[in-house]
Image (cartoon, rainbow, N blue to C red):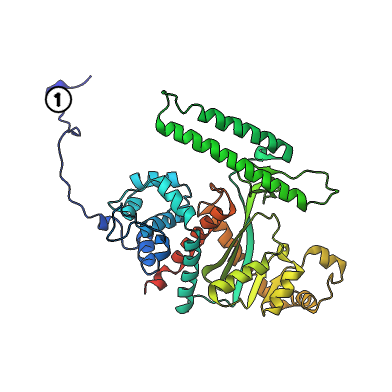
Amino acid sequence: MSDDSKGKPRVQEPRRNQGVIRFEMPEDALEPTHRARILWDVTGTLELGLFLAGVKAVEGTVGRKTLSPRMKLVLWLYAISEGIGSAREVERRVASDTAYRWIVGDLSVGHHTLSAFRVEHGGALDQLMTDILAALMHKGLLSLDLAAQDGIRIRAAATAPSFRTYGSLLECREQAALHLKAVLSQADDPELTLAQKVSREAGARDFQRRVEEAITTVVQLQEQRKPSAKEFARASTTDAEARVMKMADGGFRPAYNVQMATAGSPLGGPRTIVGVLVTNLGSDMNSITPMLDQIERRTGELPKVLMADANHAAHDCIREATERGVEVLIAVPERQQKSGAHVDADPAIVAWHERMKTDEAKQLYRARASLCELSNAHLRTHHGVSQFLLRGATKITSMALLAAISSNLLQHAAALLR
């Protein structure tokens, strides 16, 4: 039984109908060592002029100003470092997260703008990757004495039922044409807004385009097959460039093969991604040569030692790497170990077999996993690339470059800001 002799308790309730004036400094919202602030500072030391190529809004002319490319770049780099790869999710974080709001400042940016920035600046991202490696080499922070390469298969934005044969794709072509005709017939429908009509027509034309791309791809794949092949070639109406690959869990799903080359020391320390190569080949074979070409293009040098697993043991690649002065440490496939004889009598191949038997090579090869497999693991688990949300190798390359740039900048930010 309550005691009423003490009177009614006095409780202070929240009031929300009272106006409040607050004074704040957005610059002070993040601590000096926050990752978003570090990325903003380090990108300020880089040349970002290529991101403004083709901009029509220049001084002395009319037109809306262009949103800061540095802001959009840092927004993506920070989001990727947080494991976010969706433009819509980034837009939501801008409205709720202090770090994202700090990057944007008093500007506003939507997911359409973020998506366009990511896929329309592939050349600028490629050059930025090269510029970062050049800066690291200039400061003595990057050594190509030892590099390791490995591939990781990442799920594509396509489903297994979207893969169709040539005959099925011809039926899809007819359906796409009928669908577009039906959409255009609704142009005078008063119940639909102009935005709805434009959206529906764009979607119908996009599906028609993807079907045509799939038909072209199937024709090319069928021509490459042997006449005795029993199965017909298939292509996806969602992403014509995706291919069904064997994944790490043993299953088969539409995916892309992302090859990354990482340089570093076997004793530990910063790891630097020096090459990014996106293919739709399920095999890692024949990927060493294009990766060496890319590393040389970006840095002007070739690694002294390049390590890779047995899936990369293509004799042509090993032979060419040896001719270019690169010592390859690639595990010898089991089928060649059991045969007891060299499949190719070429001196470079014989030397490779003998080299991998030495204790020095075996000791150094142990560093391979800590170099390349760590970078691949971070790409999947920490950089929001467990599954691609984009379609096409070109767009996916841009995403992989953003992840590599984010990793390299955070690994070396302190040294680059000195």
Q: Residue at x 80, y 43 (%)?
A: 231
Q: Residue at x 36, y 75 (%)?
A: 418
Identify the image quadrant of residue 111: top left
Q: Residue at x 42, y 26 (%)?
A: 192
Q: Mark 1, residues whose alpha carbon is within 10 Å: few (<14), some, or many (≥20)?
A: few
Q: Position of residue 235 (x, y in %)?
A: 68, 44
Q: Position of residue 161 (x, y in %)?
A: 67, 37
Amino acid carrying mark 1 in the image: Lys
Residue position for label 1: 8
Q: Position of residue 308 (x, y in %)?
A: 67, 67
Q: Is residue 343 above or below residue 158?
A: below
Q: Is residue 344 above or below residue 220?
A: below
Between 317 and 120, the one nearer to me in the picture: 120
Q: Is residue 367 visible?
A: no
Residue 378 is left or right of residue 78, and the answer is right
Between 287 and 142, the one nearer to me in the picture: 287
Q: Position of residue 367 (x, y in %)?
A: 62, 70
Identify the image quadrant of residue 103: bottom left
Residue 360 is left or right of residue 103, and the answer is right
Between 69 and 79, the one nearer to me in the picture: 69
Quadrant location of the N terminus? top left
Q: Is residue 401 visible?
A: yes
Report how many numbered discs are placed on residues in the image.
Answer: 1
Mark 1 falls on what kind of element?
A: loop
Residue 256 is left or right of residue 109, and the answer is right
